Image: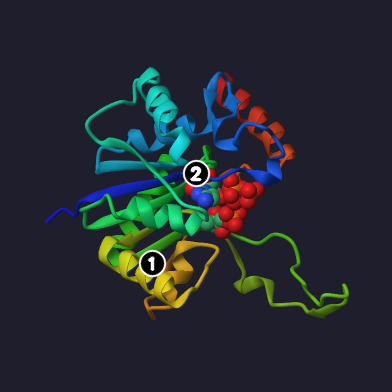
């Protein structure tokens, strides 16, 4: 039987590292807010039945308006309000879904590729959970608080983790509930599922799937967007 899929796109952050007055997910890239570019990629995948966009409570109306203007307004896209931390926003989005599986994605990763999302979906159906990632290219050091190197982990086993992250909905909801109950804060959703003792499969993605975080990422994003337009 075919499994049903939903997606949670989180776009409720403040973007403090971007240092702009507008929240970074709403900054324009080629006349469209960044989160709309992200949403467009997910919208091209018919297997995804429901898409939940999570944003700050004061931004719900304008997000709905942008979605309408972009022609993405259909029966499967809903906007809900998020929470203080990314984890709270994901949790809020998960409550709105009733599908078998879910993809969780950062609204500020607009360059994710459709084939990589689909590869994650396939791996999650096989392994229960899967995340997009790339092998680290730099040598990574562990450093003490006074700036002295304390260890050099073996690079061959290190991956830089991205989104989407795909899970059985029941597993990730259980993992988030447990995190809330135990006051655990993770930096991604896989961490919470790992705490349940479940295995999470790595799916190799692309270095271009950047999370737009700091001002230089915006220059790179504009460059990438121009390249896509000219293709
Ligand atoms: N309370 C929050 C915090 C973050 N996010 C979302 O999680 C994604 C990744 O987070 P990050 O890049 O850290 O975004 P911000 O928290 O906005 O950035 P900063 O840490 O620089 O303030 C973004 O799409 C962001 O909108 C969210 O939905 N709710
Ligand atoms: C989930 C994530 O995008 C995986 O790389 C990342 O951990 C989010 O981190 P941030 O603390 O919100 O920047």
Real-space Cα separation, disc 1 to disc 2, in angstroms: 18 Å
* Vertical side of 215 occupied by 174: above or below: below
Label 2 near ligand 1 (CB < 8 Å): yes
Q: Residue furthest front?
A: 58
- Observer-nearest residue: 172 or 220? 172
Image spot of residue 90 (x, y percent):
41, 54
**Residue depicted at x 49% and y 44%:** 12
Q: Mark 2 points at which residue?
A: 12
Label 1 near ligand 2 (CB < 8 Å): no
Q: Residue 125 carries which label?
A: none
- Observer-nearest residue: 92 or 72? 92
In terms of image quadrants, where is residue 91?
bottom left
Q: On the picture, is 121 further left or further right than 54?
A: left
Indicate which quadrant contains ligand 2.
bottom right
Image spot of residue 231 (x, y percent):
55, 22
Categorize mark 2 by other alpha carbons within 10 Å: few (<14), some (14-19), many (20+). many
Q: Name the residue under label 1.
A: 176
Q: On the picture, is 198 further left or further right than 23?
A: left
**Residue depicted at x 45% and y 60%:** 131
* Vertical side of 140 occupied by 121: above or below: above
Which of the marked residues, 1 or 2, is nearer the chain's N terminus? 2
């Amino acid at each position: 039987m075919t499994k049903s899929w939903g997606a949670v796109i989180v776009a409720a952050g403040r973007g403090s590292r971007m240092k702009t007055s507008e929240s970074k997910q709403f900054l324009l890239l080629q006349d469209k807010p960044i989160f709309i570019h992200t949403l467009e990629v997910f919208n091209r995948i018919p297997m995804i039945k429901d898409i939940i966009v999570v944003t700050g409570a004061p931004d719900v109306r304008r997000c709905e308006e942008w979605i309408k203007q972009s022609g993405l307004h259909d029966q499967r896209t809903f906007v809900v309000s998020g929470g203080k931390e990314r984890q709270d926003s994901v949790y809020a989005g998960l409550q709105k879904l009733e599908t078998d599986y879910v993809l969780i994605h950062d609204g500020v990763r607009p360059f994710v590729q459709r084939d990589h999302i689909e590869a994650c979906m396939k791996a999650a159906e096989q392994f229960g959970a899967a995340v997009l990632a790339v092998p680290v290219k730099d040598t990574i050091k562990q450093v003490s608080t006074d700036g002295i190197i304390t260890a050099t982990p073996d690079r061959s086993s290190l991956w830089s983790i991205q989104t989407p992250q795909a899970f059985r909905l029941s597993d990730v909801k259980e993992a988030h509930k447990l995190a809330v109950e135990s006051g655990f804060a993770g930096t991604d959703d896989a961490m919470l599922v790992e705490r349940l003792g479940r295995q999470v499969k790595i799916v190799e993605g692309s270095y271009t799937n950047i999370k737009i975080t700091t001002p230089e990422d915006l220059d790179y994003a504009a460059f990438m967007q121009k390249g896509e337009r000219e293709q």
